[in-house]
Image (cartoon, rainbow, N blue to C red):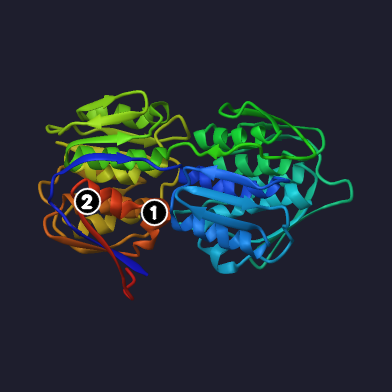
Amino acid sequence: MKKMIIHGGKRLSGSVTIGGAKNSTVALIPAAILADTPVKFDMVPDILDVHNLMLILKSMNVHSGFADGVLKIDPTEIIEAPMPSQSIKSLRASYYFMGALLGRFGRATVAFPGGDNIGPRPIDQHIKAFKALGAEVVENNGTVHITTSGDGLHGARIFLDLVSVGATINTILAAVKAQGATVIENAAKEPEIIDIATFLNNMGAHIRGAGTDVIRIEGVSTLKATNVHTIIPDRIEAGTFLSLAAAMGDGIRIKNIIPEHLESFTAKLIEMGVQLQINEDEAYVAKSDDLNAIQVKTMPFPGFATDLQQPITPLLLRAMGSSVIVDTIYPQRVKHISQLQKMGAKVRSENDMIIVEHTNTLNGATVGAGEIRAGASLMIAALMADGETQILNADNILRGYGSIVAKLTALNADVTIEDTAEIAE
């Protein structure tokens, strides 16, 4: 295990360049096994999830190499083999191998995925879609077995009962090589879904409507990569740095963003009174004082992202008055609250709401990153706090934020990562 040590209270300034989207990357890597040629991705974040996915690829004899933000994957010698259970259990996005293997081989056996424990995230909509496409699904002792009959997968009309990014992407991966036409209704609209569809279409897939609530797919027999796919910028990393810049910045420029992907978040910052200048592909956050309390309600895209409710929480401590957060996606996503309280934050969770009161001073403490975005919240709070903060279970932060120490250090932060045997309670 690793811990992050931060000496807080230092004002931050400079610029930071946002990396490729984690939530795209963890779906694009499984999607690559659908290709009949080697593929290459650019702007790949150097995060633990990428390395865990590469271990899963290796178990299937899929060769991969990663250097300087470029990931090469060669699935041309892929074999069906059991995937390493440790990588599966530590990485929820490993469930994309269900759709990808089903699309490639017409069958898949995948251990039930792990990842962040932020409340119920069932895969019933994924299974519903696989069955509609002609697969049989059996779950046995935490392992999902998916098979098809002799004629393989066939197109179908699928209405998702819940708007689910994971189910939408998994259905696309399974349907892209299925015979006939597939229609996904009530599909999620996240930018990462457009990114996946763009990658597959550039290899010869016929996917239309990504980014809307109805996606249409005409199955194709082969997919061949002819160019490098550049992953979109990470809107969650961008939002995290925007929050950090507003909380402790004396002028921070955040480069490589797509402003349209952040509109629900930047609108809230502007409502708070954050001094924000947004350009074509970057944003500048000036020193921001006299902030207003706000209300935040998370919603599916284009609404306020659930992944950003934790990173904005420390900033709300700066606002005068009481701010309220309602997470309609994952109401149980409150692992950061008790840890922020250890640092003196006036924040509490009650009746599926997070209430954040103005807090003059935070103090360094030993806290634990229960999951990725909780870790990001504590990281920002630690930069705001007086004294030293030790964030245990910092591996969770490294799962979602590439080159984070280098990026923070370049902004004048005092941050280091150390190995430790300690585990947060």
190 and 353: which is toward the camera: 190
Q: Residue at x 68, y 53 (%)?
A: 75
- Give, as a three-letter code, the residue at label 2: Ala
Q: Quadrant of residue 218?
A: top right
Q: Is residue 160 left or right of residue 297?
A: right
Q: Which residue is mark 1?
A: 372
- The answer to which image quadrant residue 279 occupies is top left
Question: Where is residue 373 drawn, in percent x and y?
Answer: 37, 50
Residue at the (37%, 34%) spot, across then down: 256
Q: Amino acid at mark 1?
A: Ile
Question: For the image shown, how many numbered marks are present on the structure?
Answer: 2
Q: Which residue is mark 2?
A: 381
Measured as percent of width and height from the top left, residue 217 is found at: 71, 31
Q: CA distance from mark 1 to mark 2?
A: 15 Å
144 or 40, which is in the foreground? 40
Disc 2 element: helix
Q: Where's the N terminus, which quadrant?
A: bottom left
Q: Quadrant of the C terminus?
A: bottom left
Q: Residue furthest bottom?
A: 421
Tell me where residue 145 sits by quadrant: bottom right
